[in-house]
Amino acid sequence: MENDQHHAHAHHGPHAAGDAASLNRIAVVLAFVSGFALTIVPLLRHGSTLRAALRIALAADTASVAIMELVDNAIMLAIPGAMEAPLDSFLFWGSMGASLVIAGVAAFPVNRWLIARGRGHALVHSNH
């Protein structure tokens, strides 16, 4: 019986780790999709083709979203218990809020640099 309990526990660990890695990938994909959608939808409403809107969104948002994801995830991992905190806890939402503010500050210089060179969201605004 002891071997059965040990086997069940050992099997549960890697499975849970695999589930967490899968959820992390889904979260990152959703961050990129939602970030691009926030750029693409107004361009489509303004009359851009889907292909043109996708190209502009990729040029405008890829660096910004990537930096925000890296910083946000690093902060969440650095705060003890934040990744395991339940969704209804202050620890989760406080950590998430702080990590997003810090991530926004980290992405700001890159966005400013891109806009100053007519790239990034300058492309978006030139198409409105």
Image (tube, helix red, strand yellow):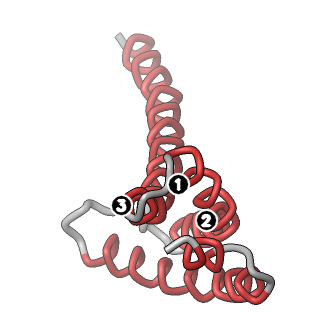
Residue drawn at 66 percent across, 83 percent down: 106
Measured in 3D between alpha carbons, the distance from the residue under mark 3 to the one under mark 1, in whole angstroms, is: 20 Å
Residue 50 image offset from top left, x and y in percent:
50, 46
Q: Which residue is mark 1?
A: 32
Q: Which mark is residue 61?
A: 2
Residue 65 image offset from top left, x and y in percent:
59, 65
Would you place residue 62 above or below residue 64 in this image? Answer: above
Q: Which residue is mark 3?
A: 45
Would you place residue 94 above or below residue 29 in this image? Answer: below
Q: Earlier in the sequence, mark 3 or mark 1?
A: 1
Query: What kind of element bears circle 3?
Result: helix
- Amino acid type assigned to the residue bearing label 3 in the image: Arg
Measured in 3D between alpha carbons, the distance from the residue under mark 2 to the one under mark 3, in whole angstroms, is: 18 Å
Label 3 or label 1, whichever lies nearer to me, is 3
Q: Earlier in the sequence, mark 2 or mark 1?
A: 1
Label 2 or label 3, whichever lies nearer to me, is 3
Query: What kind of element bears circle 1?
Result: helix
- Amino acid type assigned to the residue bearing label 2 in the image: Asp
Label 2 or label 1, whichever lies nearer to me, is 2
- Between 126 and 12, the residue placed more toward the observer is 126
In the picture, measured across the screen, residue 54 lies left or right of residue 35, that is: right
Bin the neighbour count of mark 3 within 10 Å (Cα to Cα): few under 14, some 14-19, many 20 and up: few
